[in-house]
Structure formats: C-alpha cells, structure tokens
Image (cartoon, grey):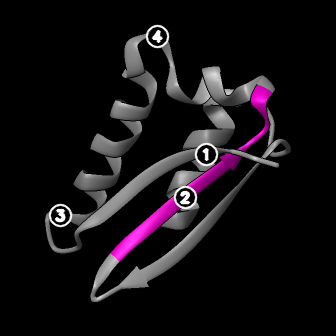
Amino acid sequence: MKDLLDFLLNLATGTKEGYEIVESNDNGNLIYIIKADKSIIGQIIGKSGRTIKAIKNLLMVKSKGQDSFMLNVEERE
C-alpha cells in the first residue's frame, strides 16, 4: 500500500523529491505520515482537500476494507 501511496503522490506533485512517507503500525492500524516540503503541501492536499481525499479513497479500495489506516500530512522540518 505504501508503494501505491508513493505512486499517487508522485502523480500529484510531479516529483519523487520533496516528500517522504513514514509507515507505522499501532495495534493493527496502519499509520501513514506524509512529510512534505512546504512548497508541495498544497499540491498534496489540493483545493478544499480534494486530492488527499481522493488518495485516501483509492487506498481504501486497495485495502478492500480489511486494513484500517490513518493518513496524515505534515510539513517537513
């Protein structure tokens, strides 16, 4: 699922640089944190959050409702 997320972020931003994906597991729940540069956070989130919602929906389809996950976007320091 992390590979799909990376692919979708690459499409949304046009680059593989400028962000990193941190994956962790908390009691069976997958947590994906997208740490991105300030310059591309707007591209990841999209207008009114449409892009990040679409990415989350695609990840839910991929997981087929079996895995529960959280998706967060943070500014990279």
C-alpha gap between disc 1 and disc 3:
26 Å
> How far from the left and from the top, in percent, is residue 23?
55, 73
C-alpha gap between disc 2 and disc 4:
20 Å
Residue on which disc 2 sits: 33
Residue on which disc 3 sits: 64
**Looking at the image, is mark 3 or mark 4 nearer the viewer?**
4
Q: Give the residue type that dot 2 points to.
A: Ile
Looking at the picture, does residue 57 appear above or below residue 49?
below
Q: Is mark 3 on a helix, strand or loop?
A: loop
Labels 3 and 4: the sequence-earlier one: 4
Dot 4 crowding, Cα within 10 Å, few <14, some 14–19, many 20+: few
Residue on which disc 1 sits: 74
Q: In this view, does 63 lie to the left or right of 51?
A: left
C-alpha gap between disc 2 and disc 1:
7 Å
Residue on which disc 4 sits: 47
Q: How many marks?
A: 4
Q: Is the magenta stretch mostly helix, strand or loop?
A: strand
Dot 3 crowding, Cα within 10 Å, few <14, some 14–19, many 20+: few
Q: Give the residue type that dot 4 points to.
A: Lys
The part of the chain drawn in magenta is: 30-38
Residue 49 colored magenta?
A: no
Q: Give the residue type that dot 3 points to.
A: Lys
Circle number at residue 13: none
- Residue 14 visible: no
C-alpha gap between disc 1 and disc 4:
17 Å
Can you tell which quarter of the image residue 28 is in? bottom left
Name the residue rendered at 40%, 22% in the picture.
Answer: 49
